[in-house]
Amino acid sequence: MKLNIAVLPGDGIGPEVTDQAIKVLNAIATEFNHEFIYNYASVGAIAIDEHGSPLPESTLNICKSSDAILFGAIGDPKYDNDPSAKVRPEQGLLKLRKELGLFANIRPVKAYESILNKSPLKKEIIKGTDISIYRELTGGIYFGGKQISDDGNTASDLCEYSRFEIERITHLAFKAAQSRKNKVTLVDKANVLESSRLWRRVVIELAVQYPDVTLDFLFVDNAAMQMILNPKQFDVILTENMFGDIISDEASVIGGSIGLLASASIGDTYAMFEPIHGSYPQAKGKDIANPIASILSATMMLEHFELFKEAQLIKDAVEKSLKLHITTPDLNTKYDNITTSKVGDFIEDVINNPNDSNLNFTNIHLGQSTII
Ligand code: IPM
Ligand code: MN
């Protein structure tokens, strides 16, 4: 398959983790005879520095003319600490999602067997967790009208949803549940918010079209508690934009590191693949950030194009890396010399040698990546 991929590494650790995803994609291309063409473009704080805009027109055009987008990370402390900044890196990501109509953000959450002890939560609570969060991505409070009074002392953000916006992601969530454990949990705040009551009405209406799927409801405050009390109760979680943002960061604690969580942002025409983590500026350039979220985001991209064998090979290689402690410091306690690029090298090697069952991993620790 020939794919034109827009690559938007962005800020902070974005470029270094994205490099690893590209490394892995190239190994897949060689192994399976695909042609992946990368079109690099800038976004975020770096794009503000270079072009004066967090999403230059040229970047948007590259995205629109590609088959898929691989996104790194966005954000810079110089803007976080300046609430009066008019131009912010995050606007680049939000505009990209909106302009490309990426209304469904799918965030898989999994407790990997071999690293159950990396989570601060008890093993028996998280063991077997497998959740798919369907977060609405182009509506709600993120995109509603924003106001600040003239004296600067009163501000508001509007949370608005239309039936259509709820319907299209609800269908995706129910369809996903049908190929999983047939359960959808709608997370909302219907005891307080009118927009949440609309979500409930619409989702209940559509649920009759999926009689094999059980639908239940949780208020978001309770959902936040249930997520760490008993995460195994969840299959597909369906929720609006901001609730999804918050509970997915919370859910990352189950897996042991936010550096493991990938996502796919899907619309009717375009698709973008992005780790859920931010730009982690403290780690920038240090080669210590976990590249797995980016690698698994690229894997979701392959699944999007129905390259399932390829995707499975990467997922197996990732699991192998976790099992053998070939992981960055956020997860590792065993070795202290495993860098971002070594994790990428290792996964690349496993892909290049899929049938090699007798791997000698000491080389990795000696600073070489070749498996003999
Ligand atoms: C995410 C991020 C973004 C969001 C930020 C960077 C705008 O936190 O993808 O979860 O809030 O959606
Ligand atoms: Mn977030």
Image (spheres, rainbow, N blue to C red):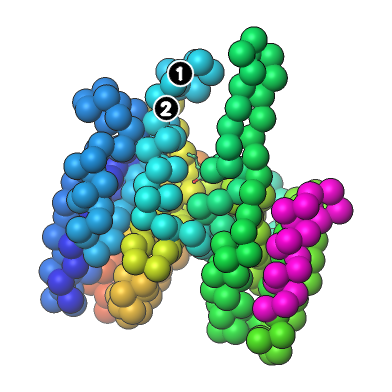
Residue 112 locus on image (x, y percent):
56, 63
Q: Would residue 1 appear left or right of 312 to someone viewing this image?
A: left
Q: Of 142 and 12, which appears nearest the observer?
A: 142
Q: Main secondary structure of the magenta part?
A: helix
Separation of disc 1 and disc 2 at Cα? 7 Å
Residue 114, by quadrant, is bottom right
Q: Residue furthest front?
A: 150
Amino acid identity at mark 2: Arg
Residue carrying label 1: 85
Please provide the residue range marked out in magenta: 189-206
Cβ of mark 2 under 8 Å from ligand 1: the answer is no
Q: Which residue is mark 2?
A: 88
Above/below status of 26 relative to 138:
below
Q: Residue 25: image x %, image y %? A: 24, 62
How many numbered circles are shown? 2
Looking at the rendered structure, the kind of residue marked 1 is Ala
